[in-house]
Every structure is written in C-alpha cells, then in structure tokens.
C-alpha cells in the first residue's frame, strides 16, 4: 500500500506563508484537495511531487522523501497545472518518449495502454499543438500514467475540459482509485470534488480546514447559515410570512428588498416558493448572497 | 547521455523560431570575407577584424548563447521541463544530454563557417586553426550558458552581459581578466594551430585548454546540482 505522508509541513516564501503546518496521510483511493484559489494547493502538490522543499516538516512518498529524490518518480506521476507540452510532437511520440524516459521494458506497449486509458488512440498521430485543451490535458494524463504509477497527483485536472471530458476523466480517476492507487487531485470547484472523491482535504489560507468523508463535509457546508437577498411584489408581507418558518432565522427589510437568513440551504429554498404561493406574492428575485467558495471555506475554518 | 532527451531537445530546438537566429551571423562572417577578397585589399587589413572581431568575439558567443540557454532554458520557461524531470533519471543524465546537444549544434554552426571563412581569407591552415579554437570555445560556452539557464530566469541577458562587459570590455582593459575569458582561449588555440599574424593569442595554450576544461566541468557539475534542486512555481505566484 503506497501512501503519501505529510507531517507538520509548512512552506513560506519570504514573509508569506503558503502552507501552514499541514499533517495528512493519503492512502489508496481518490482524494480531492479542495480550496479557493491561492489557498496553497499547488504549493502542497509541488512539495508532494518533489518540486519544492518544505520550509519545515517532512513530505514522504512511500516512506522516502520527495525532495531531491528522482527515484520517487518510479511510483509517482504528476499532471501539473501549467498546460505545457512539447507541441511539436504527436501524442504518440510524446507518450512513447515518456515511457522510454522511465526505462520501461516495453515502452510501445506502455504508451499504447496509456493512450487507450485516456481515449486518445484515435488522435495519437496528430501534433499536440493542434489539439483542443481537453485533448492536450488527456495526453498529459497519459504521459503521467505511462509507468502505471502507484500515486498520481493532478493539479486542477478539470480546468478547460468540457462536461463530457470531465465525466470521462472522473471515470478514469475512479477506476484508478478503485484499483488501489493513491490519487490526489486539486480543485477550487466544490462540485468537481463531489463527483469524484469520497475523501476530501479542504485547505484554506494554507491551513488544513477540514478533512475526511465528502458527505460529512458537504453537510457542514450546507447546514450553515445562508444569506439570501429576496425581491418580491410585497416584501413586507413576505417578511412576516417567512418569519413564521422554522428554517428562517432572521429577516431584514430595506429599500432594496429583503435580506433573509436561513439556517439550512435546502429547506429554505423549498420553503420560499410555498410561502410565496400561499400568500399570493410574486417573488421577483432570489440571490444567495454568500455563495462564493471563499465564504463557504471561511465558514469551515471558523467552525 | 540519454538519447530520448537528446532527441526531444534537438526537435525542440529546431522546432522553435529562435533557431533561425543561428543563421544570420555565420552568413555575415562568410559574406564579409568574400567581400574582402573581392575588394582586392590586403587580407591583413580586414582579416583580423572580421575573423576575430566578428567571428570569434560575436558570432561564436551569440550562437552558443542562443543554443546553450535554449536547450533547457526554453523548456523551463514554457513548463515542458516538468515532463523530463518527473522521471527516475539521475539529473546528471539530463544535463549531459542537454550539453551534448547544445555543444554539438554550436560546434557545427560556428566551427564550420569559421573554417570556411579562415580558408577563404588566407589558407586552409588558418581555417583549421579557427575551427579548432572555435570548437573549444563552443563547448565551453555551451556548458557556461546551460548553467546560466539554471541560475537565472533571464539567462540570455546574463549571457549577453558576460559577453559584452567581461569579454568585450574588461579583457581589453585588465589583462588579469583574460584568464577567465573563453574568447581568449579560442584565439590562443586557433593561433597555435594556424601560426599566423592574423591572430594574437594572449594567454598560453596549456592555460587556455586547462581553463576551458575546468570551466566546462565545473559549470556542468554545478548545473547538475542546481537541477536536483529544481523548484516549480505555481501559475499564480
């Protein structure tokens, strides 16, 4: 069983702390590293992939330090965020070259298998710079998978993919996770993580804010006070009616409309139309006013 | 030496537009020599200026800089270096492959035109001398500029500063700096083979060869160590 272990890992750049005292263990299966932009996800991934020394603490892949140790790449594959490929090569040449660099006993077979996994076999003889963004991304994943690594680290792998390609990539990650590999991918989009992984590590401002099963984190995220701004044909009457609802914890009436605080996202969004219908009030606009990921994350940090 | 890395490097170099920068200078050197011959003026009047002033002092280091700083530097710049670095290869193998490609391309694209220019100016012997000196210079410059591409994100700028300020200015003013001038090694070695009044070697040949070897090896060792500690930066930082 191959694991990636981080113990009390910190990384700072000058005065800026990018990663702050993170301890986590990643085992087989798919893990999502979730956090808003600038939270330190990439820094963390780069440390795991041996491209950055931790300022403090230890990063170990299968028991060996990742920094200044190229032999970790025998068991680790990296798909970096930067979409850089040798555009003058075809996907076949590129993946084959990667297989040869790994000194695999049968590089042709390995390249064929990897390109098949990402469904790029049909386009493998075209130059990479003629590919769409999603195809380039899949080619890079094939290159990272060519030596069948135990650990695969992907930095924002779904960026620039269309929904169908996303689904395909998610399936692939699932398959790899189910077959006992340790897969870690980062994302700043909650829904991506929801669809792929059972385990989530949430990092906010360099700290590990939450970690564990996706569903419990999702519950923490949804069962929190939500603020909606509501505009209707009769704001005052709607405010009175809403105050009678258990899911509503506060209502503020102002010239611009209503600001409603709800204890639970789901219940409130189901209640509002019913109440409005019963009162004969026309709701013109409902805006969740704190739905930015940052607010979700900062709530998690506070709780 | 890793053939796969050498192959990707060579393809990358020839595939980039920067590669076209290799042609104008050698063409200019040979063109000026042809012009000098056609003019009927004695070759001692224009020979040193074209062969040394332009060929050895400008063409050689500029070509070496474009190639040497490009073999790894351009891959670091555009991020493709990651694909080569995420392999369980000793970093020595990566640097050596890059160096061999850089040195080979630089030697071919500078020593050959210098041979032609020397032969047209005076004799095949002058051509051979210039080719030998240039080849030594090309290898040394390649190692030096390859190292620069790992020390700085602006290797071309630093390389130009070395060529223009150190070799172009200081070696003419302060004789002590000649010991650390690849240009001087090149001229000395060329002079020792060609034995002509067109070239004036100002450092001894053994010193030139030994210093070139030391610079090449030291730059390479340092480059290998720098590559071991190669860090990636995120897109946002």
Image (spheres, grey):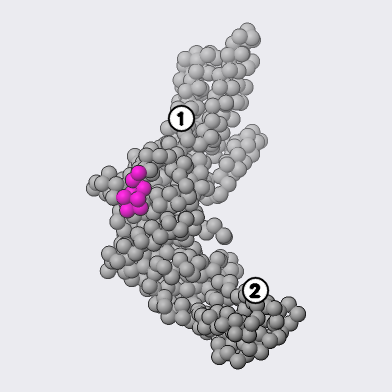
- Residue hosting label 1: B107
Q: How many marks?
A: 2
- Report whether A194 appears left or right of A109: right
Q: Chain of mark 1?
A: B
| Residue A187 % position (x, y) | 48, 65
Viewer-proximal residue, A180 or B4? A180
Q: Chain of mark 2?
A: A
Label 1 packing within 10 angstroms: few (<14), some (14-19), many (20+): many
Q: Quadrant of residue B235?
A: bottom right
What separation in Å lies between label 1 and label 2 (alpha carbons)? 72 Å
In this rendering, the label closer to the viewer, 1 or 2: 2
Viewer-proximal residue, B51 or A138? A138
Q: Quadrant of residue B2?
A: top left
- Asked if residue A115 is among those painted magenta in the image, a careful observer would answer yes
Label 2 packing within 10 angstroms: few (<14), some (14-19), many (20+): few
Image position of B162 with respect to A6: above or below: above
- Asked if residue B46 is among those painted magenta in the image, a careful observer would answer no
Viewer-proximal residue, B151 or A249? A249
Residue found at x 52% / y 58%: B233
- Report whether B20 appears left or right of B223: right
Task: Please say whether residue A44 is visible from this viewpoint.
Answer: no
Image position of B72 with respect to A9: above or below: above
Magenta segment: A114-122
- Residue hosting label 2: A285
Residue found at x 57% / y 26%: B25
| Residue B9 % position (x, y) | 43, 39
Helix, strand or loop for the magenta stretch, by majority: helix
Farthest top residue? B40
| Residue A238 % position (x, y) | 66, 85
Identify the element where label 2 is drawn.
Answer: strand
| Residue B194 % position (x, y) | 49, 19
Image position of B188 with respect to B164: above or below: above
């Amino acid at each position: 069983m191959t694991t990636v272990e981080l113990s009390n890992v910190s990384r700072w750049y000058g005065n800026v702390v990018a990663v702050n005292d993170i301890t986590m263990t990643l085992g087989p299966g798919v893990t999502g590293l979730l956090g808003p932009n600038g939270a330190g996800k990439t820094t963390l991934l780069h440390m795991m992939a041996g491209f950055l020394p931790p300022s403090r603490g230890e990063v170990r892949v299968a028991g060996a330090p990742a920094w200044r140790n190229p032999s970790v790449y025998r068991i680790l594959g990296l798909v970096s965020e930067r979409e850089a490929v040798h555009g003058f090569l075809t996907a076949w040449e590129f993946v084959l070259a990667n297989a040869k660099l790994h000194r695999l006993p049968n590089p042709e077979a390995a390249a064929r298998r990897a390109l098949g996994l990402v469904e790029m076999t049909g386009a493998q003889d075209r130059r990479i710079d003629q590919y769409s963004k999603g195809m380039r991304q899949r080619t890079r994943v094939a290159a990272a998978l060519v030596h069948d690594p135990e650990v695969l680290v992907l930095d924002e792998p779904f960026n620039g993919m269309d929904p169908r390609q996303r689904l395909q990539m998610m399936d692939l990650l699932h398959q790899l996770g189910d077959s006992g590999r340790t897969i870690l991918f980062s994302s700043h989009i909650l829904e991506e993580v929801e669809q792929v992984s059972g385990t989530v590590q949430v990092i906010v401002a360099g700290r590990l804010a939450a970690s564990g099963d996706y569903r419990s984190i999702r519950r923490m995220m949804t069962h929190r006070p939500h603020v909606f701004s509501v505009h209707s044909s009769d704001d005052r009457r709607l405010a009175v009616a809403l105050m009678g609802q258990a899911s509503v914890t506060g209502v503020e009436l102002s010239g611009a409309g209503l600001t409603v605080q709800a204890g639970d996202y789901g219940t409130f969004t189901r209640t509002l139309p019913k109440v409005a219908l019963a009162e004969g009030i026309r709701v013109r606009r409902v805006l969740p006013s704190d739905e930015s990921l940052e607010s979700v994350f900062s709530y998690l940090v506070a709780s | 030496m890793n053939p796969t890395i050498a192959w990707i490097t060579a393809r990358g170099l020839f595939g980039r537009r920067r590669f076209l920068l290799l042609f104008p200078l050698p063409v200019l050197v040979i063109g000026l020599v042809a012009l000098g011959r056609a003019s009927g003026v004695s070759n001692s009047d224009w020979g040193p200026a074209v062969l040394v002033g332009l060929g050895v002092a400008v063409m050689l280091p500029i070509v070496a800089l474009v190639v040497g700083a490009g073999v790894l530097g351009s891959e670091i710049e555009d991020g493709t270096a990651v694909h080569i670095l995420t392999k369980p290869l000793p970093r020595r193998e990566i640097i050596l492959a890059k160096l061999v490609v850089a040195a080979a391309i630089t030697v071919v694209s500078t020593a050959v035109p210098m041979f032609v220019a020397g032969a047209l100016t005076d004799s095949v012997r002058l051509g051979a001398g210039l080719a030998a000196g240039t080849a030594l210079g090309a290898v040394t410059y390649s190692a030096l500029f390859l190292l620069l591409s790992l020390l700085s994100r602006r290797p071309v700028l630093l390389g130009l500063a070395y060529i223009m300020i150190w070799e172009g200015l200081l070696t003419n003013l302060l004789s002590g700096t000649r010991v650390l001038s690849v240009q001087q090694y090149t001229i000395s070695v060329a002079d020792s083979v060609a034995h002509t009044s067109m070239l004036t070697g100002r450092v001894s040949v053994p010193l030139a060869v030994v210093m070139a070897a030391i610079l090449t090896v030291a730059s390479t060792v340092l480059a290998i160590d720098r590559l071991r500690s190669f860090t990636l930066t995120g897109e946002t930082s």
